[in-house]
Amino acid sequence: ESRYNPAAIEEKWQQIWADLGLDKTQTDSAKQKFYALSMFPYPSGSLHMGHVRNYVITDVIARQKRMQGYRVLHPMGWDAFGLPAENAAIDRGIPPAKWTYQNIVQMRSQLQRLGLSIDWDREVATCSPEYYKWTQWIFLQFLKAGLAYQKEAAVNWDPIDQTVLANEQVDSEGRSWRSGAKVERKLLRQWFLKITDYAEELLNDLDKLPGWPDRVKLMQANWIGKSIGAYLEFPLVDSDEKIGVYTTRPDTVYGVTYVVLAPEHPLTKRVTTPEQQASVEAFVQEVANQSELERTAEDKPKRGIPTGGKAIHPFTDEEIPIWIADYVLYEYGTGAVMGVPAHDVRDFKFAQEKSLPIKVVIVPENGDASTLAAYTEPGIVVNSGEFDGMISTNAKEAIVKHAEKHGFGNARIQYRLRDWLISRQRYWGAPIPVIHCPNCGIVPVPDEDLPVELPEEVEFTGRGGSPLTQLDWVNVPCPTCGTPAKREADTMDTFIDSSWYYLRYPDARNDQQAFDPAKTNDWMPVDQYVGGIEHAILHLLYSRFFTKVLRDRGLLNFDEPFQRLLTQGMVQGITYKNPVTGKYIAPAQVDPNDPKDPETGELLQVFYEKMSKSKYNGIDPEEVLAKYGVDTARMFILFKAPPEKDLEWEDADVEGQFRFLNRVWRLVTDYSNQPAVASQQALTKPEKELRRAIHTAIKAVSEDLEGEYQFNTAVSELMKLSNALADAPCKDSAIYAEGIQSLLILLAPFAPHIAEELWHSLGNTESIHIQPWLKYDESALVADEITLVVQINGKKRGDLQVPAQADKAELEKFARESEAAQRYIEGKDVKKVIVVPGKLVNFVVG
Ligand code: ANZ
Ligand code: ZN
């Protein structure tokens, strides 16, 4: 046991910890709770470095909190429904369940190799009937609350395979990944959740989350997209009907020179004149097959045509033309826009292309109106009747008031957020638990019939619609009237599964309820959530939405699920790319000192990029573990970069952490061979210094683990302490013993195996992971002496040790008497002396 051999200790301790039940969640209610949560992985089959980083970060936090005396909940599970399992079934004939559970077994054992202090008794897999029974039950809660409804919405339709495609199955040219057919848009009746009912609260409650990165909160706010404006009505010339528009700029209403409808707008047909009918119909057809992205792309020319119809401007009574255009989206606002080319960039472009009039109604406070571009800033209102001369911001209010008074408009708030489309026309998801009855309409599956289980005898062809629609499974009697009825064959978006899993962990084995509210309210909210920035919007927003709805159903007593959020950075690998061919070259084929393409000899670009198979820049966690052990991998990941920053994988730094752990190993094993500790009365100077180093480390590491989680600087503190111990002359002192023990305790959350092994080598019989976290002694931090720098004309000429409490005059005296000063001042005229207490004395000589 003289050498550090990770293989000999890591699995051994993992087994012992498991036998001791060290990672089990404590329920001692006298202790304060701490819920440490990692975003659960999709069981793709193998663990990658991004996972390792995520789970190690959460593990360090969980371990330290346990040592600090908290009862900690640190669970893990599987986000296990979704497309890849269904693709594996189509491609290789493996049933989705089998493929998924195989992957879970594989990845669970990989996770266990990382020495994560996870309570595996609470593991959940969203694809198991024990779990999705409650996903379905929660859906029914939404239905009962009036928050789930059906409406028509477009899907990607593959006309050859006759199947719905997910967005990921459509390439950038709009073709099906499988058949290559040009994908069409098709309207289907689908299920939605009314997240828009919670838009305002989801926005406002971001203020309750000081422990979230500002960047994430901003992304959520933008996604919700609150917009404050007005609704205004433009009557049609020849009927009582009106076109309602939503605008953020009512102050520009006198500049309206046309009105535009989204092509799908129900009034399109009505307003189109016979002469325009053919071309309008053709245009509507064309736009129907475009995606929203294509329609709104900034760089594309705005396309549109006149309908021939006319509307009346409600303020001027002028007749203005009605157009349709692709840049107006049917789903936003009212699906109609008042065109103000002089003050809106898109309208300006459109008017220029279509030769529509441009009427200026806002001018800069000092300066002239330009007709070369839209003027979009505030200014003075002109050409606007009774509103002329007003400041545009005030005119907004006045114009809305006027519209309100005359009954053709009002102030309105609008959100970009849309209701959540949760229907998926696929097999591997939780079936939506409703039955369609010809007599009763939509009938929820009664609670006692849940779960609606996925049938197992299924053929996967990738053609002809969801496998569920093709099975006798859909035929059931109506639960209410007994008439032959049909099950809903859509399954739920997998984001639903992950919107509530954190509520299940506190009570994961409950087969009577989704969770016992008492238990979940006790553990929630999550104290620290750790995961990728790619979930900054949807997953986090949906989870917040679920929490609020379940709170309003009386099941939860808090508003926000995740108190603090850490979004860890990416793990990047060194990447070689041929700039001419655009090909990536595997590092094994490249000489790092002379990076050339082995085939063409061209000089390669070298940079760091997120690890991925296609770029050959990935590092397999298994290989690193086999070579260095998991403690080194953990230390490297924590040390190399602050957790929220990207991390560049560098073998030399991995090596460096391995050497550091070897030094710790030697330090402790050398020490345990030492003779018994000698006891003394007063501390010697080296002892005092060592004690200061110990308590400085305790303070620094504790602070680094508080709030901001600066694991990288915490690891450097550990390195400093180990150096101080190595250099200490007082190895037989009780202070040295304190130092060794402290080093191990501080190291324990970071490198749990080596810390445990060495702890036991000192004769301890209890696990290091249940030792109390250390507290520093403030008085030990005070230095007796400081290093005083002596400068001559601002240049350092020497330094010396002086008593820490020396005052300015004494400092000057010490400095003046120093050898360095003597040599340089000798025979010269000291014009000025500058004393910076605690640091330096500078002599200005002439
Ligand atoms: C007239 C106007 C004049 C506008 C002006 C802007 C500037 P946000 O902030 O995103 O809510 N708009 C409204 N509904 C639309 C739709 N369905 N599709 C495309 N554009 C739509 O922006 C609201 C503005 O976007 C509205 O204000 C409207 O153009 C346009 F000088 O009305 B505005
Ligand atoms: Zn019925």
Image (cartoon, rainbow, N blue to C red):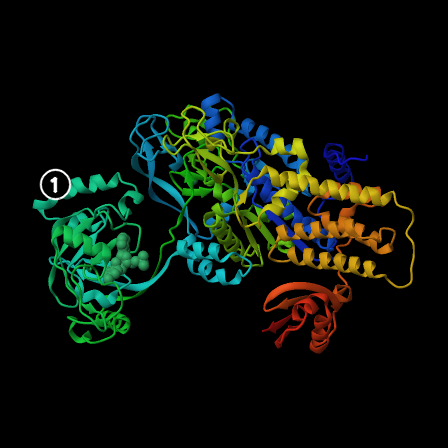
Residue 576: x and y, percent?
46, 34
Q: Which of 299/441 is in front?
A: 299
Residue 717 visible in the picture: yes
Give x and y (percent) for residue 797: 65, 63
* Residue at left offset 61%, top offset 38%: 652
Across and down, in percent, residue 842 comes to 63, 71
On the rendering, which quadrant does ligand 2 occupy? top left
> Residue at 55% across / 53% down in the picture?
565
Is 544 displayed left or right of 24 in the figure? left
Q: Nearer the viewer, residue 3 or 122?
A: 3
In-front residue for pair 332/168: 168
The CB of the residue at mark 1 lies under 8 Å from ligand 1:
no
Quarter holding residue 50: top right
Q: Quick one: which residue is furthest to the left in this view?
A: 275
Q: Which residue is mark 1?
A: 278
98 vs 34: above or below: above
**165 lies above or below 712:** above
Mark 1 crowdedness (10 Å alpha carbons): few <14, some 14-19, many ≥20? few
Amino acid type at mark 1: Ala
649 above or below 714?
Answer: above
Position above or below: 297 against 347 = above
Considering every residue shown, the one lying at the far top of the view is: 93
Query: Circle 1 sits in a helix, a strand or a loop, which is it?
Result: helix
Q: Answer with left or right where residue 87 lies relative to residue 670.
A: left
* Residue 48 location, quadrant: top right
Q: Is residue 74 visible?
A: no
Give the percent coordinates (x, y) of residue 683: 86, 62
Residue that appears at 23% across and 42% down: 287
Image side of residue 539 versus residue 748, left or right: left
Relative horizontal placement of residue 89, taking residue 808 as reference (left or right): left
Quarter of the figure that contains the N terminus: top right
**Count of picture labels:** 1
